[in-house]
Image (cartoon, coloured by chain):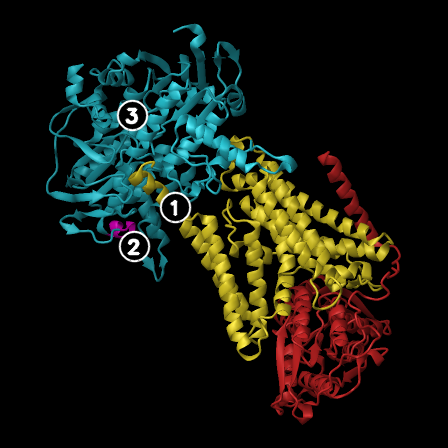
């Protein structure tokens, strides 16, 4: 490519946070009218790189060039001025305003007397809409629009500022299939009009379909820069995970089904908003069932529905052969189901309360009472048992959980379930943000539970973890169970391929 | 620029604050030669005379300051009792809920509904003056009860105020042997009746060189607040010998506070009004005394005057000053409380 | 199929509530006398709604930015007392006195905005504090008699008092305060709908982060909303004191909540980002109608508070349910219909 065709170039970027290196000598460049995908596992440094480009973080070393000239980007306004627009994952449209009002927010054309010229504004919006073929109307109030259309407004807003480069971070994460298709069409139109796009995604098939080039980051370094014809799913996965795939202990496992009778039987569960559909599977006593797949594949939504938080539109759940009618968290707890949510801090425990109170919180029904008041002694005893059973540190039962390390917080959350007679335990991303040592302890707690006959469902996006703890693995993709691994040797790339929708045939063909 | 504006604003405020702290009041000249509402000032009387006692349809509005108080309830009942014997006389009660703004709104409403007379207890005599004037100009006689309006109107029926303060002071002086420390619990500032009560009390106490008023705080007419105020009096003035509260509710609060401090019966606690609860506390020895006025009588007196006005040719614009009807007060102590019969306790 | 948006639907509801109330009172009161539905009484209702309505313009702005201002009642008292001081101790012309009062209101609003937007004290706490402070200042500068007892200051020269009266002075005329109400509502609505500032208010209330990213000075917008509330409140105070022809420290008790209640009933959601000035006007008319009607029905006035309470709970519930439903629909739409 000719040098003058490069719109943005980042050279030799270094960044570290409190001594931990996050980016090392990273190179990244985007051409005019190019869709350049950026991939990498969680923690590979994608979002750090983007935040440096958009001025949210400062870089330690390196230089950014815009259209060949070195530039300093210190805040988001700087990057907007250059012509870079970021389409945020959490939508930043204003629902009570119209499409046009949103697009020109803060830059409304005005008539004399500072009165907004709505006619002109709507016209300008319409021109943009026509130019890029967006399925929108300038006068629609955003309140009435779906998520996909709201996202388009953001893109339109970027374009209205004559942005030459759009950054899209997981744009399809909350979109339905049809909405995503519409977005892809628009991305193609934009490309034809000479707009460049940085496309960050976990979804290989999108990247495969859309992008002209692909940069893969791994552990904060450039792992590969692939041209369109080089983007081969199996190769990409291999690059993302690392060359040492088959030597690493965590990357390969012989699965062995365990367990006795069927404990949980899910039949044809379907979500109201179509985040998962017609899901059927079973979990046995003493079995750890792992759920793999990409973020947004519908796993969290599925386990929430089983636990009774969200109401599915159809389908049934049986626990030990007994049908669960009108499920609710309260009922689930009574029936012996435990749930460790994904968002530990907001849903798993109460940060300001002590270990004792947190453990007691779900167990007040089994704690002794003095009249109406709960026995403090019993409460404390239970907390001490929990601390001992799973080695919560600090072992002070009065310690506020909010100030503990992530690993110990998670142990408190697990601890409160261990105090009950559990039949089924559901854990969603059990070790996110937890250090390695504590991870192992949590795995052994889960294994311990299984050996006592408890059925365990583990939802995790950490492939190593999935292989490490599961006796059997189900992989979900876009709301369907697409693959089951049992009694066989499974590797990380097999799971990832299944989650990405890459078939083995394809893999073989390449 | 913004700073300059802010500074200017600050100076303006500070200026008006300083002005508020002292200086001489000025007299303003009125370009219009009267208030804006003076449509019929000095002119013909708009009064329509009807005779309530011969069967003409008559309606009277009672506009209360706060119907939740025993006093207002007493007047309301008094007015209603007075009119109950005539089918052609209707009484409607309105509650201003202690707000002068609301009372003014009610007054406009009542005037436009052409009531034949209004019995009013002014939440704020100055603020209600325009409304009272407007009513009188529209030919509706206004009879105020206890709380006067700052404009000439048909009549004011009132319990003694200055004299009640004087009587309480004399009684208390006797109780405590004409020497010692005493305190006052005040009501909401700015009300003429309560200010006069306090003034009467203070003026009289000034005659006794041995008595010192060591503290005076407001409890906003509230029993609960009075308990707090009394507690602080008792703490800061351990030798306190007497307390005068501007109304009975606060005197009751003071008595409760004294009792819980172990000083039941040791202090001279006086109130004013003479409501039922206060009389009971005097009987039990918690309170020393009160200046009793019969609210029912007061209400029915107001009603009688209203009916008289409705039936007469007489108009307010011949008056130079509001005629006053003063209710006979009774000094109530433990000795004579039994003489107030149950049916006169409101 | 075109769906009705929140604003339109909510407007229909508040207008409907008002219409139902008027119909109800006409039937209940009017059955005997026709006392309720006549020009004079309707004008009285508009007059009673005027001061809350004028203050409501500013309060609407504040609530649209998802803020709240609890101090307006105390502000009325303070502005009233500032004017009373000018009245009592100087011979400055009446327009200067009014201007001083307005400046005092602007300063109060500026102070509210400062502690809320600059010092980032939560609106509820911040304006709760200034609610006490303004009232206390009113007491401090109150006019006192020789004994130091606070008194109500008469302000009854006709150059001022006419503002509290009607055009032409007759009891059947149009009150000046109603003229002011119309001006405030029209201007307030135009500013809200047709200027950048107005759009920015919505943006700040609906999504502060998005507003910042769009280059909106969020701090300034929030501050302006409070300053405008100060201005509106001062104007409200001018008309209140002119009608009472006096000022006391007790002015504006209860006024903390009536403009807020009017806004909420009129469709200004406390969560911010929705509603408008016209809605608040309808809310203020609703409240005034309710008070007027209850009075005429010879009901215990306490009932009006029950009715107010119930209505407020209902509309707030509606807003919450509606928001939930819209969020769900947004997702479902995406899921089922795709983009077209």
> Helix or strand or loop: what does disc 2 sit on?
loop
Task: Tell me which chain appears cyan.
Answer: A
Q: CA gap, disc 1 to disc 2? A: 51 Å
In the picture of the structure, the residue carrying the numbered disc 1 is: C2
Within-10-Å neighbours for mark 3: few <14, some 14–19, many 20+: some
Q: Main secondary structure of the magenta part?
A: helix
What tint does the image give chain B?
Answer: red
Within-10-Å neighbours for mark 2: few <14, some 14–19, many 20+: few
Q: CA gap, disc 1 to disc 3? A: 35 Å
Estimate the x, y position of residue C244 in percent, counting from the top left. 73, 64
Chain at tag 3: A
Asked if badges 1 and 3 are on one and the same chain, I answer no
In front: mark 1 or mark 3? 1
Q: CA gap, disc 3 to disc 2? A: 45 Å
Estimate the x, y position of residue B212 in percent, counting from the top left. 81, 68
Q: Is residue A333 magenta?
A: yes
What tint does the image give chain C?
Answer: yellow
In front: mark 3 or mark 2? 3
In front: mark 1 or mark 2? 1
Asked if badges 1 and 2 are on one and the same chain, I answer no
As drawn, the label of residue A24 is none
Chain at tag 2: A
Asked if badges 3 and 2 are on one and the same chain, I answer yes
C326 left or right, relative to C93: left
Compared with A250, C89 (above or below) is below
In the picture of the structure, the residue carrying the numbered disc 2 is: A365
A452 left or right, relative to A92: left
Residue segment shown in magenta: A328-334
> Helix or strand or loop: what does disc 3 sit on?
loop
> Helix or strand or loop: what does disc 1 sit on?
loop
Nearest to the observer: residue B95 or residue C61:
C61
In the picture of the structure, the residue carrying the numbered disc 3 is: A203
């Amino acid at each position: 490519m000719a040098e003058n065709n490069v719109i943005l170039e980042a050279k030799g970027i270094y960044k570290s946070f409190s001594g931990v290196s996050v980016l090392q000598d990273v190179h990244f460049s985007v051409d005019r009218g190019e869709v350049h995908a950026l991939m990498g596992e969680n923690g590979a440094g994608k979002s750090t790189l983007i935040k440096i480009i958009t001025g949210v973080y400062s870089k330690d070393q390196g230089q950014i060039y815009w259209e060949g000239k070195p530039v300093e980007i210190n805040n988001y306004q700087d990057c907007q001025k250059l012509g870079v627009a970021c389409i945020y994952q959490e939508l930043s449209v204003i629902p009570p305003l119209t499409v046009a009002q949103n697009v020109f927010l803060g830059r409304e054309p005005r008539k004399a007397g500072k009165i907004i010229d709505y006619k002109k504004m709507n016209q300008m919006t319409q021109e943009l809409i026509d130019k890029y073929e967006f399925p929108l109307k300038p006068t629609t109030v955003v309140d009435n629009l779906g998520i996909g259309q709201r996202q388009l407004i953001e893109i339109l807003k970027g374009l209205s500022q004559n942005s030459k480069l759009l950054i899209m971070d997981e744009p399809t994460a909350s979109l339905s299939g049809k909405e995503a298709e519409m977005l892809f069409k628009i991305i193609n139109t934009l490309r034809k009009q000479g707009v460049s796009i940085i496309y960050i995604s976990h979804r290989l098939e999108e990247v495969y379909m859309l992008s002209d080039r692909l940069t893969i980051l791994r552990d904060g370094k450039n792992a590969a820069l692939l041209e369109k014809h080089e983007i081969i799913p199996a190769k990409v996965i291999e690059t993302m995970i690392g060359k040492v795939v088959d030597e690493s202990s965590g990357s390969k496992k012989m699965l062995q089904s365990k367990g006795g009778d069927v404990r949980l039987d899910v039949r044809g569960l379907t979500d109201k908003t179509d985040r998962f559909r017609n899901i059927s599977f079973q979990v046995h006593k003493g079995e750890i069932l792992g759920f793999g797949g990409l973020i947004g594949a519908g796993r969290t939504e599925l386990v929430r529905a089983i636990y009774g938080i969200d109401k599915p539109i159809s389908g049934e759940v049986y626990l030990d052969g007994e049908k669960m009618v009108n499920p609710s968290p309260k009922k689930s707890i009574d029936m012996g189901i435990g749930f460790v949510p994904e968002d530990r801090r907001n849903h798993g425990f109460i940060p300001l309360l002590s270990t004792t109170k947190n453990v007691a919180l779900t167990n007040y029904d089994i704690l002794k009472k003095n009249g109406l008041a709960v026995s403090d002694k019993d409460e404390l005893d239970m907390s001490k048992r929990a601390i001992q059973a799973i080695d919560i540190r600090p072992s002070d039962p009065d310690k506020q959980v909010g100030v503990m390390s992530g690993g110990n917080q998670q142990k408190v959350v697990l601890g409160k379930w261990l105090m009950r007679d559990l039949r089924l335990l559901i854990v969603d991303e059990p070790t996110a943000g937890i250090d390695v040592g504590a991870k192992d302890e949590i795995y052994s707690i889960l294994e311990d539970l299984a050996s006592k006959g408890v059925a365990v469902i583990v939802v995790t996006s950490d492939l190593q973890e999935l292989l490490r703890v599961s006796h059997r693995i189900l992989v979900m993709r876009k709301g369907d169970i697409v693959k089951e691994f049992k009694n066989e040797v499974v590797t990380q790339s097999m799971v990832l391929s299944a989650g990405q929708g890459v078939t083995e045939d394809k893999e073989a063909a390449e | 620029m913004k700073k300059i504006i802010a500074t200017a604003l600050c100076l303006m405020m500070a200026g008006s604050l300083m002005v508020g702290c002292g200086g001489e009041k000025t007299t303003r000249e009125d370009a219009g030669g009267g208030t804006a509402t003076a449509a019929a000032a000095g002119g013909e009387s708009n009064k329509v005379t009807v005779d309530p006692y011969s069967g003409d349809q008559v309606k009277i509005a009672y506009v209360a300051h706060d119907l939740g108080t025993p006093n207002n309830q007493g007047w309301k009942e008094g007015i209603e009792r007075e009119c109950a014997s005539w089918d052609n006389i209707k009484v409607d009660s309105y509650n201003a809920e202690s707000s002068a703004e609301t009372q003014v709104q009610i007054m406009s409403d009542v005037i436009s509904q052409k009531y034949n007379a209004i019995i009013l207890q002014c939440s704020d005599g100055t603020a209600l003056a325009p409304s009272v004037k407007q009513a009188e100009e529209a030919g509706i006689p206004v009879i105020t009860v206890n709380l006067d309006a700052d404009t000439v109107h048909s009549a004011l029926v009132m319990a003694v105020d200055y004299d009640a303060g004087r009587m309480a002071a004399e009684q208390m002086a006797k109780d405590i042997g004409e020497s010692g420390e005493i305190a006052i619990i005040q009501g909401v500032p700015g009300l003429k009746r309560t200010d006069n009560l306090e003034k009467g009390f203070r003026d009289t106490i000034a005659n006794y060189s041995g008595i010192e008023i060591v503290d005076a705080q407001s409890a906003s007419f509230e029993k609960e607040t009075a308990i707090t105020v009394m507690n602080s009096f008792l703490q800061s003035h351990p030798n306190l010998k007497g307390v005068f509260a501007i109304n009975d509710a606060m005197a009751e609060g003071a008595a409760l506070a004294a009792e819980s401090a172990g000083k039941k019966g040791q202090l001279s606690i006086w109130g004013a009004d003479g409501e039922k609860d206060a009389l009971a506390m005097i009987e039990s020895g918690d309170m020393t005394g009160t200046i009793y006025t019969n609210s029912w009588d007061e209400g029915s007196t107001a009603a009688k005057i209203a009916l008289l006005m409705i039936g007469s040719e007489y108009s307010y614009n011949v008056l130079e000053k509001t005629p006053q009807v003063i209710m006979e007060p009774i000094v109530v102590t433990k000795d004579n409380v039994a003489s107030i019969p149950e049916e006169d306790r409101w | 199929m075109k769906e009705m948006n929140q604003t339109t639907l909510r407007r229909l509801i508040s207008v409907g509530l008002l219409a139902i109330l008027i119909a109800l009172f006409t039937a209940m009161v009017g059955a005997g006398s026709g006392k309720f539905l006549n020009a004079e009484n309707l004008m009285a209702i508009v007059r009673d709604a005027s001061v809350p309505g004028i203050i409501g313009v500013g309060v609407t702005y504040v609530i649209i930015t998802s803020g709240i201002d609890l101090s307006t009642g105390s502000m009325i008292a303070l502005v009233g007392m500032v004017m009373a001081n000018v009245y009592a101790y100087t011979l400055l012309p009446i327009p200067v006195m009014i201007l001083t009062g307005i400046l005092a209101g602007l300063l109060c609003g500026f102070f509210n905005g400062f502690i809320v937007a600059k010092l980032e004290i939560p609106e509820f706490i911040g304006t709760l504090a200034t609610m006490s402070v303004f009232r206390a200042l009113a007491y401090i500068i109150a006019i006192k008699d020789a004994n130091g007892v606070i008194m109500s200051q008469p302000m009854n020269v006709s150059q001022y008092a006419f503002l509290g009266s009607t055009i032409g002075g007759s009891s059947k005329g149009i009150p000046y305060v109603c003229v002011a109400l119309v001006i405030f509502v029209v201007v307030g609505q135009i500013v809200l709908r047709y200027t950048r500032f107005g759009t920015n208010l919505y943006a700040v209330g609906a999504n502060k982060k998005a507003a910042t990213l769009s280059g909106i000075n969020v701090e300034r917008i929030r501050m302006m909303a409070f300053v405008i509330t100060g201005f509106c409140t001062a104007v409200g105070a001018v008309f209140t004191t002119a009608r009472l022809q006096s000022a006391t420290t007790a002015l504006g008790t209860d006024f903390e909540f009536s403009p807020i209640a009017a806004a909420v009933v009129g469709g200004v959601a406390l969560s911010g980002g929705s509603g408008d000035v016209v809605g608040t006007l309808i809310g203020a008319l609703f409240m005034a109608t309710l008070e007027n009607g209850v009075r005429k029905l010879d009901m215990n006035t306490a009932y009006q508070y029950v009715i107010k309470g119930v209505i407020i709970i209902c509309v707030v519930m509606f807003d919450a349910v509606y928001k939930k439903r819209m969020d769900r629909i947004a997702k479902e739409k995406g899921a089922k219909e795709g983009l077209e």
